[in-house]
Structures are given as C-alpha cells and as structure tokens.
Amino acid sequence: MSGLDPQGEGGRECAMTTHIRIQQEDFDINSETKALRSGTVGAVATFTGIVRGDDGLAALVLEHYPGMTEREIARHVDEARSRWPLGGVTVIHRVGRLAPGDNIVLVAVAAAHRKAAFEACEFLMDYLKTRAPFWKREERDGSDHWVEAKQSDDDAAKKWR
C-alpha cells in the first residue's frame, strides 16, 4: 500500500510508502528498516515485540480475521499520517504458533525528524495492543487459555484520543 503525505516537508506532497503484512514467517528487522530510507528520511523509529517465555509459557498462538485485520491496521496508519509528517510505515504482525523468543510484531516509522517517528510508532503500537483484531491463546503446562485485554494497555492508548 502507498499514499501521499499532504504534510510533507515544506508543504510539498511526498510519497509515503506503507507496508502492512500479516504473516507466519519471521521478518528481518534490518531489511525492513532499510526499505524505509529515502532522501527525506532523517529518522526511523522501530518497535519489535518478542514472545516472552516467563511463567512457563510454551507457545503463543495468534489468530486474525484475514482482510479485516489489514484494513483496520491501514485505517490507523492513515490516522498516524494525519497526525505526523511521515515518510513511511511498516507494520508486520505474525500469526500462528510462536515460541518464546520469537519476533511477534514490527512497527517501523520513517520521518524527517525523530519526534514524529517516535510518536507515530508509539501511537501505532498502542493501537495494535488495544484495537487490532488479533486473538491470542497461551499454551502452558499442557493447557491453554485466551489472553484477555489489559487495562494498562487501554490506559496507554487513551492519551491518543
């Protein structure tokens, strides 16, 4: 996906690249970050989520609603673009059975300046934690259970309203 950023540097429209992928395979953080670089990019902020292995977690199983998930993430990328002058955004979220230590999500945001990149990256990650249509099931000690939403994640997302 791609679009134009009407808040481009100096009031000019600049091409903004958007990549949204839901996939089972791992991702390469370096190559994804490199793909966002261009002549107008002065900062790339990234967040990489990793499956924790605490409390005896054997695996985390993620499910999503194909098509709807990508559209919802794209809607929030558009919201980020309306708030900050961005040069590019990549959101990759893995699904399937993931083991402790596996990468689970990458949010990478490119902008001319660090403040916009950091804030947009945090905004998108807060959205993914609270509103993205993913369902998580933890496997531990021979049993499994669905992960409930956390109040602390909802509280973090309130600052963007």
Image (spheres, grey):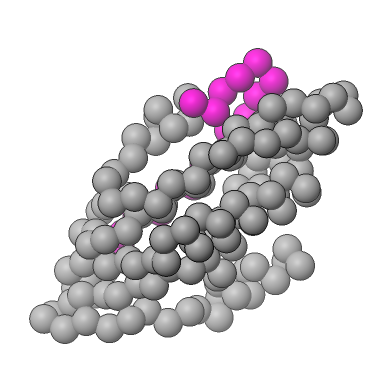
Where's residue 45, x and y in %?
57, 38
Residue at image location 48% in from the left, 68% down from the top: 133
Q: Is residue 52 above or below residue 94?
A: below
Quadrant for residue 148, please give it. Answer: bottom left
Residue sitting at the far left = 142
Magenta region includes residue 43: yes
Where's residue 22, x and y in %?
40, 52
Number of callouts: 0
Q: Is residue 80 above or below residue 156?
A: above
Q: Quadrant of the C terminus?
A: bottom right
Which one is nearer the viewer's eye here, 16 or 99?
A: 16
Residue sitting at the far right = 11
Which one is nearer the viewer's eye here, 63 or 9?
A: 63
Q: Is residue 111 at all visible to an observer of this figure?
A: no
Where's residue 15, x and y in %?
69, 27
Quadrant for residue 151, please give it. Answer: bottom right
Q: Quadrant of the N terminus?
A: top right
Residue at image location 26% in from the left, 61% down from the top: 96
Q: Is residue 2 left or right of residue 158?
A: left
Residue sitting at the far front = 67
Q: Is residue 159 above or below residue 115?
A: below
Q: Is residue 26 left or right of residue 89?
A: left
Which one is nearer the viewer's eye here, 161 or 25?
A: 25
Magenta region includes residue 121: no
Quadrant for residue 154, please give it. Answer: bottom right
Start-end of magenta stretch: 35-53
Residue at image location 59% in from the left, 52% down from the top: 74
Where's residue 59, x and y in %?
21, 67
Q: Is residue 69 at all visible to an observer of this figure?
A: yes
Residue at image location 49% in from the left, 26% down from the top: 35
